[in-house]
Image (spheres, grey):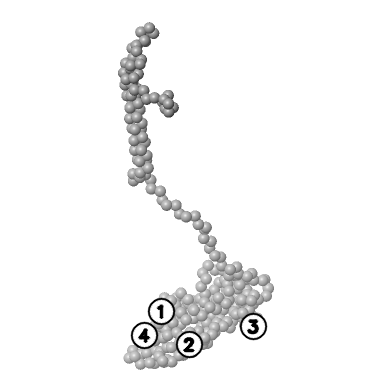
Amino acid sequence: MDSYGRAPYIRCDAVKRHNPPDHAGGGAPQDGRGCNRMSTGVIELIILAGITVFLLLKLRGVLGAKTGLEEQQAPRAPQVEPVRQKRAAPVAPVEDAGVDPDSATVAEGDADIGEALASMRRAEPAFLPTEFIGGARQAFEMILMAFEHGDLDTLRQFLAPDVYQGFADAIAARKEAGYTVEARFVGVRDARVVAARFDADSREAEIAIRFTGELISAVRDAGGAVVEGDPNDVRRETDVWTFARRMGADDPNWLLVATGE
C-alpha cells in the first residue's frame, strides 16, 4: 500500500523480475507467459460477455417483434350490462263478475254492451275496448278509401268473404260503366259502439260501431262529367259497421262482416 492507501499496480514484467526460479523447491521456472495467459483469459471473458449481451438483445428483438404469422387477437368488446327488454305494462285482471273500467268507458252507460265487452276481456285479457276503437277508426278509413280507389287487395285483408264479394261486385260494375272516382278522406268525426255480442261457447265476438266520417268524393263518367258527388264539397257519411273475431285466436285481426246505416 502506498502512502495514500492505494493498491500498487503490478506490471507483468515486475512479476518476472521479482519471481526468480525456485530450484530448491523443484518448482517450474516462472516467466511472462503466466501473465500473458491471464490477460488472454480476461480478454476472452470480455469477448464472450459481449457476444452474450448481443445475442440476448437480438433474441429479445425477435421475440418482441410481430412477424405477421402469429394468430391475430380480436379486440375484446367492453363489458356492458345486458339490455333488458321493456315489458308492456301488465293488464289489469278482469273480475269474474262486473264490468271493468275500460269496457265501461266504451259502453258509455249501456249495460248490455259493457257486459259483452267485459266477457270478451275475460276470454282474452289483453283485449282492450278503448284500443279496439282506435284501430277501428283506422280500418274505417283504409277500407273506405280502398273501395273508392278499387283496391281489391287491401279489401281482401279486412273483409269477410261475403262482404268482400259485395264490394268487389260494386267496383266491377263501376268499372264496366266507365266510371272513375276521385276521393280524399278528411277524417273520422265520431266512432262509438252501438252493439256488442259474445258467445262464450264458440268465443265468437261481434262489435258494431257507428262511424261518422267526412270525405270529398266525385264520380265521373267516361267523358269526365261528374255523375255523383262534388269534387269541391266535403261530404259527411254515417255508417254502422260490424266487426267479428274469435277471442283468443292467433290472428289478431277483426274482419268486417256487415255494413249498414
Expressed as whole percent of the image width and height from the top left, the position of residue 233 reads: 43, 92
Which quadrant, please, contains the N terminus?
Answer: top left
Instruction: Residue 97 in the image: state x and y as whole percent.
Output: 68, 73
Q: Position of residue 84 (x, y in %)?
A: 53, 61
Residue placed at 40% from the left, 81% from the top? 150
Q: Is residue 135 left or right of residue 153?
A: right
Which is in the foreground here, disc 1 or disc 2? 2
Q: Image check: 1 left or right of 255?
A: left
Q: Nearer the viewer, residue 10 or 189?
A: 10
**Circle 3 residues within 10 Å: few <14, some 14–19, many ≥20:** few
Q: CA distance from mark 4 to mark 2?
A: 27 Å
Residue at the right extreme? 97
Residue beneath the point at 45% across and 87% down: 215
Residue 229 lies in quadrant: bottom left
According to the picture, the residue beneath numbered tag 2 turns out to be 214
Dot 1: within a 10 Å radius of its alpha carbon, few (fewer than 14), some, or many (20 or more) residues? some
Is residue 8 something one can see in this rendering? yes
Q: Which mark is residue 176?
A: 4
238 vs 256, nearest the viewer? 238
Can I make out residue 206 in this image? no
- Dot 2, how many residues are within 10 Å of its Cα: few (below 14), some (14-19), or many (20+)? some
Dot 3 or dot 2: first in sequence order is 3
Sequence-earlier tag: 4 or 1: 1
Residue receiving disc 1: 151
- Residue nearest the viewer, comparing 22 with 193: 22
Mark 3 or mark 4, which has the lower sequence index?
3
Q: Secondary structure at mark 3?
A: loop
User: Which one is closest to the eye, mark 3 or mark 4?
Assistant: 3
- Amino acid type at circle 4 is Glu
Disc marking residue 109 = 3
